[in-house]
Amino acid sequence: MAVTPPPTITPAPTPAIQRGDRTTFASRVDAFITWLIAAVAQFSAVASNVFSNATDAAASASSAGTSLTNANLAKWAAETARDAAQTAKGLAETAKGQAEQARDAAAASAAMASGVVAFVDSNSIAKGSVDASKQVRFECDALIPTGTVVPLTVPAAGGTIATLSDLQEMTRAMTYYDNGVSTAVAYALGGTQRVAPPSGAKTMSFTGWPAGRQAVQFLELVNIGLGGTPAWPAGTRFIRYDGALQTTAAAANITWQTSGTDYVMVSTRDGGATLIVSVLRG
């Protein structure tokens, strides 16, 4: 039977894996593992070829007395099988060495990552499993003082992280602000504001109402009726004692105090276009 040349074994990928080169480590390990998976089948094919050729060589050798030519062919087949076996052995040893390098490099990287590695804050630290364009990163330079390490303790419960903007309304609601004589009320200055204007004509105004949600402003109006009834923004509605909304304070039977404090709740749910005013009286 004719000798079958050994099948080709794909050379191992180069350059070799370097444990100290973190920038190429992952890609080279991936390339090596991919090669090794395919090489297993190639090693098996070479071994099968060696066995077949060796079997043929043995058969040829047994009939060497009948034909010198057959003996020479058997010798050549045996030598070919021997060389192929040596090549397979060398590739297997190379694969073993690279696998051990990959193992050692992975262990070293894991040990380093669990120690003192710090990632640059311009790099993302996580990405979406479905949409990889959704990523998260920490910003360290903006607020952390130089030379300061800020520990972040992870709570033993799942949930959504609240940001400063989420707490803005709660903080504002707990803030008291004395507006002095001004009747211009800025929503952001505090959930409770005192207004004590001088005697005479006066106009209440409001700025900074948040859009798209319910908002409430509590007012302490001192002597607001002294010297004239205060004017309110267009779109203001006053709650009468029976719950009906009126376009003027007078229609809601509200008389502003000329010597004392009116406690007033102003609310809106359309960014200030419509204001609902309720005067708290005993």
Image (cartoon, rainbow, N blue to C red):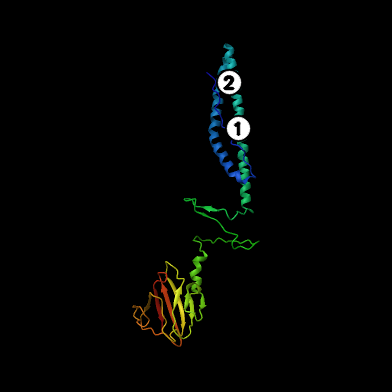
Residue 91 tag number? 1
Residue for point 53% across, 53% down: 126
- Residue that sits furthest to the bottom in the current view: 259
Q: Is residue 159 above or below residue 14?
A: below
Q: Is residue 117 above or below residue 250?
A: above
Label 2 sits on what residue type? Answer: Ala
The residue at which mark 2 appears reads as 77
User: Is 20 in front, or is 145?
Assistant: 145
Specify which label sits upstream in the sequence, 2 or 1: 2
Measure how far apart labels 2 and 1 are at the Cα level.
21 Å
From the top left corner, tell me how far across and down residue 270 is, in percent: 40, 69
Of helix, strand and loop, which one carries label 1? helix
Of helix, strand and loop, which one carries label 2? helix
Label 1 sits on what residue type? Answer: Leu
From the top left corner, tell me how far across and down residue 103 is, in percent: 61, 43
From the top left corner, tell me how far across and down residue 92 is, in percent: 60, 33
Q: Is residue 265 visible?
A: yes
